[in-house]
Image (cartoon, rainbow, N blue to C red):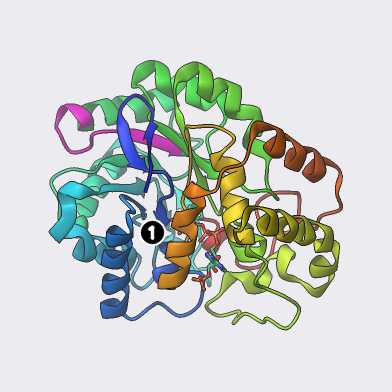
Amino acid sequence: MQTRVLGKDLSVSAVGLGCMGFSHGYGKPTEEKQAVLMLRQAVEMGYTFFDTAEVYGTSEDPHINEQLVGEALSPVRNQVVIATKFGLRFDFESGKVPLPLIPDSRPEAIKKSVEGSLKRLNTDHIDLYFQHRIDPKVSPEEVAGVMADLIREGKITHWGISEANEEYLRRANAVCPVTAVQNRYSMMARQYESLFPVLEELGVGFVAFSPMANGLLTGRYGKDDTFDPQYDYRAGMPQFTDEAMDQNRQLLALLHKMAEEKDATPAQISLAWMLCKKPWIVPIPGTRKTERMNENAKASEVSLTPAEVLALDEALDTMEMSAVFGGTPCKAKKMDTQTSK
Ligand SMILES: NC(=O)c1ccc[n+]([C@@H]2O[C@H](COP(=O)([O-])OP(=O)(O)OC[C@H]3O[C@@H](n4cnc5c(N)ncnc54)[C@H](OP(=O)(O)O)[C@@H]3O)[C@@H](O)[C@H]2O)c1
C-alpha cells in the first residue's frame, strides 16, 4: 500500500486499520485466534498502521483490544506503527450501569497508563500516543509536558490528540510538537474541516476515525439490517434508522454512481474522497472481515481529481442527509458515553 507521512516523519500506510471493533461496539468480540490471524493478514495486505486504545474493551475487561493488538503484531513489531490512547477510564466509583467513561489526563494517570499499554502491547515504545479526550481539569501545556517527558524517556516516539479543537491543539503543540489529530471525519460528519487550515499551518496530520460513518457509507446496510443493542452500538445510531435510510437515499445513490464510474465500491469512494483531499489525511476504517480489509486498503488506489472531490463536497453541502452519530446534532442515546470512544 502507498504510505503517507503524519506530522514531520511518521510514515504509515495510506489507510490504517481501526482495531476497536474486534473487541467492542460492533457485535460480540471476535474470537481471539481469529482476530490475531486477521490482524496478521492485514499486515500481509500492506497495512502498517494500527489503531487501538487502553479502553477498547468492556468495563470487566477494558484492555482486551490492546492485548490482542500486542499479541498479533509483536512478531512484526518493527514493520508496523501502533497508535494507542490514554486519558479515558471507566468510572468504577459512579455505581452506574453501564459504567460511564470519564476523562482523566492527570500526569500520574498518564504515567500509569503508558506502563500498562507498553506491557499489553508487548513493546518497548508506542509509536503514536493519543490523548483520547480532552480533560477539562488538566491544561494542554501540562499534558504536552508529560508527552515531552515520555519522548525523552523513549517510551513513546510521537503523540497526538483525539477530538482536538484549535485552541487546545495550538497550546499543546507549542510545548511538544503534535504529530496527528484523530477526529471523527466522514462524508456525513465534516465538522472538523474547519481545522484543516490549522493542521496545514502547524504540519500536523489528520487521522480520520469512523471514516465510513460506522459503515453506512459502504452502501451495504439497509432497512432489513438490525443490530443487537447489547453488543452493537449501531442499534442506537441515528444514521441506521428506517427514516435515515430514506433520508440518505440521495447520498448512497451518489456513492454508487461514482463507484461505477471509477470501477470501485462505495466504501472505497468514501475513503478515496478524503484521501484525495489532502496528502496528510489517513482514514482508519474498522472491519472484522478479511475481504473488506482488502477492499478498504485498495481505496488508496482510487484516484479522484480535485474537481471530482470538489463536486462531491458541493453535492454533500446541499443534499438531504440524516443525523449521524457524533456528527450532526442528534439526541443522545443510552449508549453514548460507553461507546463514543
Ligand atoms: N478516537 C476516537 O475517539 C475513536 C472513536 C471511534 C473509533 N475510533 C477508531 O476508528 C476506527 C474506525 O471507526 P469505526 O469502526 O467506529 O467506524 P467505521 O470504520 O466508519 O465503520 C466500521 C463499520 O463499517 C463496517 N465496514 C467496514 N468496511 C466495510 C466495507 N468495506 N463494506 C461494508 N462494511 C464495512 C464494519 O463492519 P464489519 O466489521 O462487519 O466489516 C463496521 O461495522 C475504530 O476501529 C477505532 O480504532 C476512534
- From this view, report whether residue 167 is shown above or below residue 155: above
Q: Eyeballing the image, is 25 above or below 278?
A: below
Relative image position of residue 68 (x, y in whole percent): 27, 67
Please give the name of the residue rendered at 66% of the width and 64% of the height, measured from the top-left corner.
216
The answer to whether residue 2 is left or right of residue 273 is left
**Residue under circle 1?**
55
Residue found at x 13% / y 46%: 124
Name which residue lies at 65% across and 32% down. Answer: 306
Q: Which residues are magenta?
A: 151-161
In this orientation, does residue 165 appear?
yes
Q: Return the x and y of residue 8 as percentages of the image width and height.
A: 34, 24
Residue 119 appears in view: no
136 relative to 233, above or below: above
116 is within the stretch colored magenta = no
Quadrant of the rendered image containing residue 143: top left
Q: Is residue 161 left or right of residue 38?
A: right
Amino acid type of the residue tagged 1 in the rendering = Val
Confirm or reject: label 1 Cβ below 8 Å from ligand 1: no
Q: Is residue 153 magenta?
A: yes
Query: Helix or strand or loop: what does disc 1 sit on?
Result: loop
Q: Residues within 10 Å of mark 1 (few under 14, many from 20)?
A: many
Query: How many marks can you see?
Result: 1
Front residue of 340 and 97: 340
Residue 263 placement (x, y as % from top left): 61, 58
